[in-house]
Image: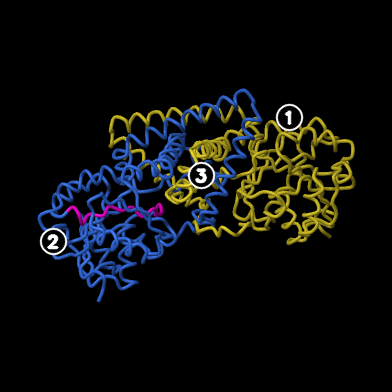
Chain colours: A yellow, B blue
Amino acid sequence: MKPFSRVALIGIGLINGSLARVLQKEGLAGEIVAASRRQETLDRALELGLCDSATTDPAAAVRGADLVVLGTPPGSMGALAAAIGGSLGTDAIVTDVGSVKAQIVQDVRPHLPAPQHFVPGHPVAGTEHSGPDAAFASLFRQRRCILTPLADADPASVERVRELWEAAGSLVDVMTPEHHDKVLAITSHLPHLIAYTIVGTVADLEDQARTEVFKYAAGGFTDFTRIAGSDPTMWRDVFLNNREAVLEMLGRFTEDLVALQRAIRWGEGEALFDLFTRTRAIRRGVVEAGQAYVRQPEDPLATKP
Amino acid sequence: MKPFSRVALIGIGLINGSLARVLQKEGLAGEIVAASRRQETLDRALELGLCDSATTDPAAAVRGADLVVLGTPPGSMGALAAAIGGSLGTDAIVTDVGSVKAQIVQDVRPHLPAPQHFVPGHPVAGTEHSGPDAAFASLFRQRRCILTPLADADPASVERVRELWEAAGSLVDVMTPEHHDKVLAITSHLPHLIAYTIVGTVADLEDQARTEVFKYAAGGFTDFTRIAGSDPTMWRDVFLNNREAVLEMLGRFTEDLVALQRAIRWGEGEALFDLFTRTRAIRRGVVEAGQAYVRQPEDPLATKP
């Protein structure tokens, strides 16, 4: 018997699409139904074989489902929960894959008939590509997945969601939504904010200078463009929904940047050297934690990772 | 007959070491002599077979050489040129691989017996690893290399340095030192500065928070650690020697960052979405220019790219 008989994937982009591949590969679902606002996305998902059926009506998708995975942008999840709440079975496990947690919990939970089966989640994985075509089964392998169940959550439901992500190859951690949002503000949201900013600074250059930036991007800029190529809607919602933690980390960053600017202006070589030596040690920490990547030249004709 | 009979590589780290591999692979040099201040580095270079002979005396290395490649940190090149000037043959071509150009030209040129054979250069390629062990022949393949000869440069010397880099697989461009420094300030120096800053902000977190950052680095932070793991001495010298252009670009970046901060604070979703859509287009430009990379998980036990 499969762990889940009917899985409803609400939203079928990079994350839920990749999860569909995992469900299929590991034989975890009797059937997979996908929901999306756009028929075009559903047609493509069916074409790619990501689901058994598809509908633009999320309430229809969750009817009879024993697992529901919310995979739409963070800002849309409250309205989505309101739309499906009346159709959810009281035994259905509801989880999500949003990159912020406290706000999503606050928005979604009031609409659920059985909040004890709500297990908010966040697979810390992704690429700069989005949509069903970007999905692939190994996306979550060796990546972290954070679950943020509330104190009254049903332990069995938490366990089943944990098993789902472990089947995807993820390393699962449990913490509070608030702690998640603080940690991700520095490891993910601030880096994206900085990358968006510097790439935006380049976007504002006059045409000739911009063309030159493309040519010489391998000197460092290219690393920023990858993350600044991420899904605009999702990232808008991340910043709007984790505002306080992001602004707090941004404040620290700005202080540090101004100090560095001053060191450059006044030619303080020793201060620069000391900082650059400390940051090199951090790189080693990330590599030792198994969370770094090596790079290979990207084929400009390829559309998938 | 080989294009160069005796090549002197002054400094034998990532860049000059990789160039040594190219010289060997393509059969471009009768003999390769390496110079370094540290005997340990030279021992390792000899062990790796990067050179035929090695010396801690750069003046001895350049004696009889028809090609001299300065591959030490930018801030050291003036003193280096002073040390070798009296031993250089008047037909010897002198080039360098420094990441800044105007200051190096100003520091090096006065010490050369035949400045018309000076062809300043900058291969826009690298990894976060340094030292002779990090060297590999394909480092420069499909990467840009910028030459910045002055107006009185001997065209034949420029041509021979161009052929050298083309043999390494690079795409060679020629521009003025000043233009180079402006372009690299945005494509390379500012990205490194930003990456050093954010990684430094993390380095200042208390221990537990820092450990968590390592675990969840795949959410975006990891991209910054790679470039913030680059050679501290070299990057100190880059910022000290391209101060004006870096501070100018940093000023633009800071303005943009503050504007974005304000948009987040005031919940201006549309402004965020518009910016993130524009930056996605820039990513496409970089990929189409062939200057992007795809990522693969890095083996924590591996020491080489």
The chain under label 1 reads A
> Can marks 3 and 2 be said to lie on one chain?
no
Magenta span has B2?
Answer: no
Name the residue: 27% across, 68% down: B47
* Amino acid on which disc 1 is placed: Gln
The chain under label 2 reads B
Q: Position of residue B34 (x, y in %)?
A: 22, 62
Q: Position of residue B50 (x, y in %)?
A: 28, 67
The image quadrant where one finds the N terminus of chain A is bottom right
Q: CA distance from mark 3 to mark 1?
A: 32 Å
Quarter of image, res B295: bottom right
Left or right position of B263 against B12: right
* Nearest to viewer (mark 3 / mark 1): 3
The image quadrant where one finds the C terminus of chain A is bottom right
Q: Position of residue B121 (x, y in %)?
A: 31, 53
Magenta span has B125?
Answer: yes
- Look at the picture and state if B238 lies above or below B251: below
| Residue behind mark 2 | B89
Q: Which mark is residue A224?
A: 3
Which residue occupies the foreground of this view, B93 or B303? B93
Q: CA distance from mark 3 to mark 2?
A: 44 Å
> Can marks 1 and 2 be said to lie on one chain?
no
Left or right position of B23 against A281: left
| Residue behind mark 1 | A106
Left or right position of A85 against B227: right
| Residue stretch rendered in magenta on the structure | B115-128
* Amino acid on which disc 2 is placed: Gly
Residue B216 in sight: no
